[in-house]
Amino acid sequence: MVKQEAQRDQTASMEDYLEAIAKLGGARKIARVKQISDVLGVRMPSVTSALKKLSEQELVEHERYGHIKLTPQGDKVARDVISRHEALTRFFAQALGINRETAEEDACKIEHVISPLSMERLAKFVEFIGACPLGGANFPSRYEYYLEHGELPQDCSNKGVKKKK
Amino acid sequence: MVKQEAQRDQTASMEDYLEAIAKLGGARKIARVKQISDVLGVRMPSVTSALKKLSEQELVEHERYGHIKLTPQGDKVARDVISRHEALTRFFAQALGINRETAEEDACKIEHVISPLSMERLAKFVEFIGACPLGGANFPSRYEYYLEHGELPQDCSNKGVKKKK
DNA sequence: CCAAATTGTTAGACATGTCTAACAATTATA
DNA sequence: TATAATTGTTAGACATGTCTAACAATTTGG
């Protein structure tokens, strides 16, 4: 694959593992190889092998047949991935009106490759839409109308907007 | 890498090669291995090897030391990639106000992983913003204000918008 | 038109990340 | 608690896509 990792220092795969461990280990409980394997849809040896790499980088604590836990550094990376994931999901679901499942799937892919700048802007965009009643609250509904009917809703008339003859 | 190809049948790399060939071969001229290698930032043997694979799939015509051309099928795939690329670039540049270079970079990554549904919606979104003076023409400027000042512009007041007490 | 520069190919190493098969440890249960 | 089921590991194959080194073809310029 041609450079697909943006400027982050983890690969998409390793970010997925960290994310999964964070989510599984969330409520105090410790993640298990089997769970990670199920969540990510890979076989257990793939997990073992990933854990080895992540341990070497001190992102994960893992002892043979034992517990799996993020180190503070690992947790930091995981939080970062998760926050990208969530912001992207919100964008697809709330701004574009895409079903939750597809929104999540796309977030899962894009979270690994989007630039920090675009990520930040996208997050702000969602905030803005949520916060601004004009550009915001009305926006999604007008947008929905457009999606459904293929043409602009009434209140999108050119009234008050200059237009070159 | 954990499944990163969405539901398309080409890998991100192969899509990149097809895209590059289409762009280079555009004005009738034929693409060269060296050019492709330069455009994609890989060494020539990587190109040769990719061309071999794409030839086997009848997406590219390539004879040793000779011309490189997309077949009709290859062209179709390439057009599709390019249209995703362009729509994404427009979104980042026009809707989010991101500089052209970063917009292109992100488009280059995301074009390979985004779902058809999200792609379609994103394209419609950009169209809508461009077409709808209210949700549209005014939107980017209000959004810019928000980006710069961190708070809502005047005309985003709640005037006329119901709000639960 | 021939030598030098450039371009292209082949062969094979390497990195990443997946998998299966075989075996080992742990846990659950009869 | 012995045994069966489950979970986890190791070893090694495999796929993709990159690279370098060496060589071959083509193109260019003296």
Image (cartoon, coloured by chain):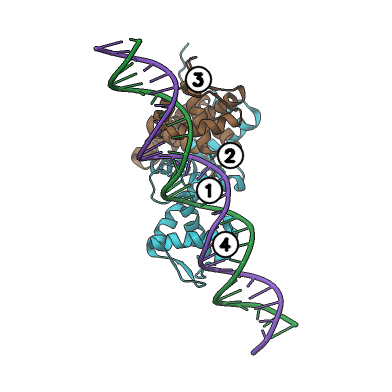
Chain colours: A cyan, B brown, C green, D purple
Q: Residues within 10 Å of mark 3 (few under 14, many from 20)?
A: few
Residue B31, compared with residue A45, is above or below; it is above
Residue D19, compared with residue A49, is above or below; it is above
Q: Secondary structure at mark 2?
A: loop
Q: Nearer the viewer, mark 4 or mark 2?
A: 4
Q: Amino acid at mark 4?
A: Met
Q: What residue did someone put label 1 on?
A: A108
Residue B27 drawn at (x, y percent) = 48, 15
Q: What residue did someone put label 3 on?
A: B67
Q: Is residue A53 left or right of residue B4?
A: left
Distance in Å between CA atoms under marks 1 and 3: 39 Å
Question: Which residue corresponds to the image point at 36% horizontal and 42% vertical from the top-left?
Answer: B150
Query: Which mark, by number, is residue B10?
Result: none
Q: Is residue A121 left or right of residue A25?
A: left
Distance in Å between CA atoms under marks 1 and 2: 11 Å
Mark nearer the N terminus (2 vs 3): 3
Marks 3 and 4 belong to one chain: no
Marks 1 and 3 belong to one chain: no
Q: What residue did someone put label 2 on?
A: B115
- Looking at the image, do the residues carrying marks 1 and 3 touch, with CB atoms under 8 Å apart? no
Q: Who is closer to the viewer here, A104 or A7? A: A7
Q: Amino acid at mark 2?
A: Ser
Residue A88 visible from this viewpoint: yes
Give me the chain letter of mark 4.
Answer: A
Residue A92, compared with residue B26, is above or below; it is below
Q: What residue did someone put label 4 on?
A: A44
Q: Amino acid at mark 1?
A: Cys
Distance in Å between CA atoms under marks 1 and 4: 21 Å
